[in-house]
Amino acid sequence: MMRRSGPLTEFEQMIMLTVVRLGDDAYGVSICEEIERRARRTVSVASAYSALRRLDARGFVRSWEGSATPVRGGRAKKHFALLPDGAKALRESRRAMTLMWEGLEGHEDLAGT
Amino acid sequence: MRGAPPRIAEEILRRVLPREDRDFILGDLEQQYRTRVRGGRGALRWYWWQVSRAVTARGHDAIRGVPPSVTNFLNFLSEGLVNEVRFAVRRLLRAPGYALTSIATLSLGIGAATAVFTVVNAVLISPLPFEDPDALVAVRYSAPGMDLEDIPSSDGMYFTYQENAQAFVGFGAWSERQVTVEGNDGPERVSAVGITSTLVPVLGVRPLLGRAFSPTDDEPGATPTVLLSHSAWRTRFGGDPTVIGTTFRIDDLPHEIIGVMPTEFALPHIAPALFVPAQLDRGEASFGGFQYETVGRLSNESTFLEARADIERMIPLAVEHFFNGVSVTMLEQMGFAPTVAPLRADYVGDVATVLWVVLGAALEVLLVAFANVTNLSLARSEQRRRELAIRPAIGAGRGGLVLHSLTESTLISAAGGLIGGVFVVWMVHIVHSVAPADLPRLNEILIGPASFVVVAGTTACAALLLGVLPALGRMNPTALIQSLRAAGGSGSARENGSVKNTLAATQIAMAVVLLCGSGLLLKSFRAISEVNPGFSGGSDVLTFRVAIPETVIASDAEAALRVQEIAERIAGLAGVESVSAATSLPLSTHVVQDPLLVEDVAWTGEDVPPVYRFKWILPDYFATMRNPLLAGRGFREADVRDRSPVAIVTEDFAIAHWGSPGDALGERIAMPSSTVAADNRWHEIVGVVGTVRDRGVEQAPTPVVYWPLVMHTRPVDAGSLFVPRALTFVVRSSEPERLTAAVRASVQSVASRLPVSEVQTLERLFSRSIARTSFAALVLGISAWIALLLGVVGVYGVVSFLTGLRTKEFGVRLAIGAERHDIRRIVMRHGVALVAAGILIGLVVSAFATRLMSALLYEVQPTDPFTFISVAGLLATVGLIAAMVPAERASRADPLNSLRVE
């Protein structure tokens, strides 16, 4: 797949942050569960992998194969970790958002729970 | 492995997940699934949700770069579909009248069409349940010179073909017979078939259990064996697989049961309980004795023409090898020629016309149902035009609109299809109980994959029709604007109006066609019912068949005495007016035809004399049957006792030979036993009776010659006594069915091992012979009335609806001075136009369509004016009444209210 330029989508950011949080334990299901727990957002394993594949192609994450276990029907596990380019992209996204939010915290239109 | 995710779901995932991540994802999902199973956290639902998301994700990956409208559509599909269905269900629950009417109408149409299709498919379309059935042919002969058709083969011919055929790989033969077995209530007569050991291999069938006959079993004098039919195995032996190898007594001889035939195995026109080896004896075989139905299997390279030529070549060989006095010249004189026809034609017979007619009727009912439901759907979309118009305005794409419409129509169609499917099961069950007993391949009429395909197909068509049509109307932007602006009588409603009018008129037209068809059949049926086949008052005559096999009573003379004793016993029963017996009744299958000599007509002995139907009877036969004597007298007791040389003939025989019944009296006839006149036993004609339709109610009468039950076939030789061993007794009484048990007892008291079979009244015999016509009339009649009902509802619906649209207009008219009857007239004009158009089209189509069923009609023209006019009148009346109701309603409306309607 071609490297795609452009900003990270919100979903991609969530994935990458979760990868960081989970460290060695970052694989398909655990990523989905973590996002569900934290952001209350239901994510399917397939769509998570879809995003991870794109991130891998852009050089933001890397993956490696773990061990196979019977509980997985004898299939191996794929682990993910953030790459420096990915970290850079994340920080840029964060900064962009922060700049957009600047000064608006107390705005009446944004008031709510 | 227990606790593993469902296989089907995994298979789907295997197909949609990208290859490089497939196993990882599957592993993740399985791991999580097991965790959830342990925690009791809806593992299955979660897994399937993952599957659905994977499918969608795959869709998204595939269409990255595709315009947003399509992705919107896909999103809508996956996320919005469930909601859409939920809303559709809610909407339908709020309009129960519409929903129930549509579902009921659809289920009726789909059910009827599928049930009939199932029958037609089994009987006419699907191949015979044999190996390579198109290579199987039935071999018969016709002899137009003797007015004979469908002559079966003889054993001599069978052996000749087996040994000399070039275009065939093999032959099988069979002949039907009645045998006696032990039943629950004593000895029972059942139908059996003697088959050559070659038949089963030639047909290419495998027994369900055990084995078929081997050549050894088929040798004359071999240890008796028997093959059970599937139904006999089920009913007599409870489907017990251990019957193989056990003994079963047939005709008082022990037979070893060697196998059971499968359910779909049947021979044309007969449903035997048992199969026994034919045990044809080559040493005793002869060219004559035509009683074996023969089937041949063509070799790979042969055509029908080559097969026929092969048989033609072999017939003279058979004449030569198995000579019985018939020469090739005689055969040529008779015009004796083989007919080689596909075996399937044998099974189907002439029932094809009936079935196609019936299928046509069912399809019409389906179309009428579709038209009706489409109209309902269009009307409903009109009523919801506001709501539907909004949708495109707020951005729902065309796709979304169609989907919206389709969801509702799919729900309705699915419900209709489901209930229709249940109807099919029920209707097929009814077919099995109501269809003419000799409906070919009845045992193969089962619900199968084809039926499901038809139900699914018609349901899908209905869903598309009902979903797409209204949506199309809504997508026109002009219509949109008009709808939003609509203050009654919107343009799009008028557009749809012409569609609705057309549909309603079409429904009327189809009802006309069906009614004309059924009217014609009804007329035929009535005409046939009134035919006198050679008897009258059939409901008062009980008939039953008795056989006196030589194994039970060896002596012919004693058999004759027993027969008379039976007659005397029965005559003594209370309520019996008269009793007699004959070797065969009119309309029955037991027929004897033989050559006859007439004294006036010289016979050289070179050719075969003309053949006539013979019946041997007891005295009082014609009185019991109520076939009046036209000249002379009936047989007397003395005639039978003294073996008097007398005979009775039917009127057509007398007229053909001597010009009038009276002139036949005193003339002499004989069965030829020799070319020397003096050596033949000449019988004097002492009576002439009315004509008899022996071959069938719808067939022309056949001349019949009646002999006294016991006779000598030669003048001097006492050993030439002939006594028929199988007879049908006829008993006239005011309550014939009450006598059944008493009659059986009388027979058993004379000879306890004589079985009684074919117990039925003459009337039943008559109804069974016209069953084919009555079946068709019944089905067509039902279809016609359903179509009429739906057509009337259709007219009412359209007129009512389109009138409703003009409420405001009528209000205005009334307000500015129009009379109520003016309004009524306007509405009725619309109704009249619809009905008239429908009737006209219907009559024109009927004029062509009814020609297709002329084979089923009896003494009725396909374009019978009385029927057509009656149908037109009926529909005009009913249609106008249907239009009058909305007309009245419109004329009664309060103008103020109408103007307020918006």
Image (tube, rainbow, N blue to C red):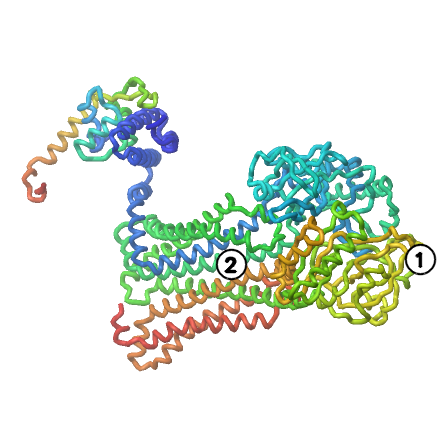
User: Callout 1 environment at 10 Å: few (<14), some (14 to 19), or many (20+)?
Assistant: some
First of labels 1, 2 by sequence position:
2
Residue at which label 1 appears: B677
Residue at 54%, 66% (x, y): give it.
B515
Say which of B524 and B533 sits in front: B533
Label 1, secondary structure: give it. Answer: helix
Please tell me which residue lies in front, B355 or B730: B730
Q: Is residue B60 visible?
A: no
Q: Position of residue B817 (x, y in %)?
A: 31, 82
Image quarter hosting the N terminus of chain B: top left
- What residue did someone put label 2 on? B364
For label 2, the SS is helix
Residue A44 rendering spot, x and y as whole percentages: 27, 33
Within-10-Å neighbours for mark 2: few <14, some 14–19, many 20+: many
Residue at the image point whose x is 17% and y is 33% from the top: A39
Whether residue B650 is visible, yes or no, is: yes
Q: Callout 2, which amino acid?
A: Glu
Q: CA distance from mark 1 to mark 2?
A: 65 Å
Say which mark, if any, is on residue B661. none
In this orientation, which residue lies closer to the viewer: B57 or B529? B529
